[in-house]
Image (cartoon, rainbow, N blue to C red):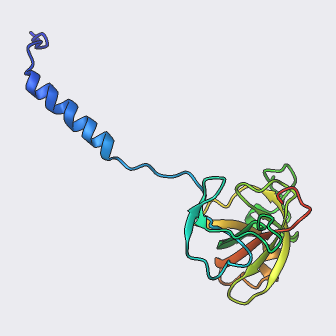
Amino acid sequence: MPQPPRRDRDPGLLGLVVLVSSLSAACATTRSNAPSHPRVSARTADRTTDRTTDRTGDRGEAAAPSRHGAPAADVMIGLASWYGREHQGGPTASGERFNMRDLTAAHRRLPFGTRVRVTNLRNSKSVTVRINDRGPYGRGRIIDLSWAAARAIDMIEAGVVRVRIEVLAGTPGS
């Protein structure tokens, strides 16, 4: 015959459990959901090491104002990857069909239609692409380029390269 549960538990044990639980919660670290790309100004992109938090909450490198006192253009430095044949003809997040031969890209936050200049920092080749999809989903990457865009900056063989992304004026993301 089963025994009924005991109701005369030791209050010291209960206190110890509560104490350990509260200490564990107090010491727990939280992970940021912020994207991993640094935001930097065009003038200080390669030499700035002072880290700060920008207006969107991203941890990145400090952005300096332009010569005229206006905020600096959005510039991001990080890793780029590319995608092609396996997604050919499939839907993008913007609703259009993916064409690997178009100069397009996927970015996590920039509005669809935004034009950005992507520069391969290994060889200084650049290409202008239009954001039409969301991603990249690879950890630590800031942009996914179409096959044609990746070919234009000579990154097909490498697969992943360090790039600078500049949002161009006059587009939805500028």
Determine which quarter of the picture holds residue 131: bottom right
| x 28%, y 42%: residue | 24
Q: Quadrant of residue 143?
A: bottom right
User: Measured from the top left, where is residue 142 in percent x and y?
Assistant: 66, 66
Q: Is residue 145 left or right of residue 114?
A: left
Q: How many marks?
A: 0
Q: How far across and down, in percent of the image, does residue 112 sit?
A: 84, 54
Q: Name the residue at the right extreme.
A: 170
Depth check: 26 or 116 in front? Answer: 26
Relative placement, left or right, of 23 versus 143 is left
Q: Quadrant of the N terminus?
A: top left
Q: Residue at x 72, y 54 (%)?
A: 109
Q: Residue at x 81, y 53 (%)?
A: 111
Could you say where residue 25 lies in the image, as x and y percent from the top left?
32, 40
- Which of the two residues, 30 or 51, is positioned nearer the viewer here? 51
Q: Residue at x 85, y 49 (%)?
A: 95
**Position in image of residue 18 (x %, y %):** 21, 30
110 and 159: which one is in front?
A: 110
Q: Is residue 161 left or right of residue 29?
A: right
Task: Tell me the quarter of the picture where residue 125 sits.
Answer: bottom right
Residue 51 vs residue 80: left or right?
A: left
Looking at the rendering, in which quadrant would you find the C terminus?
bottom right
Relative to 96, say whether 77 is above or below: below
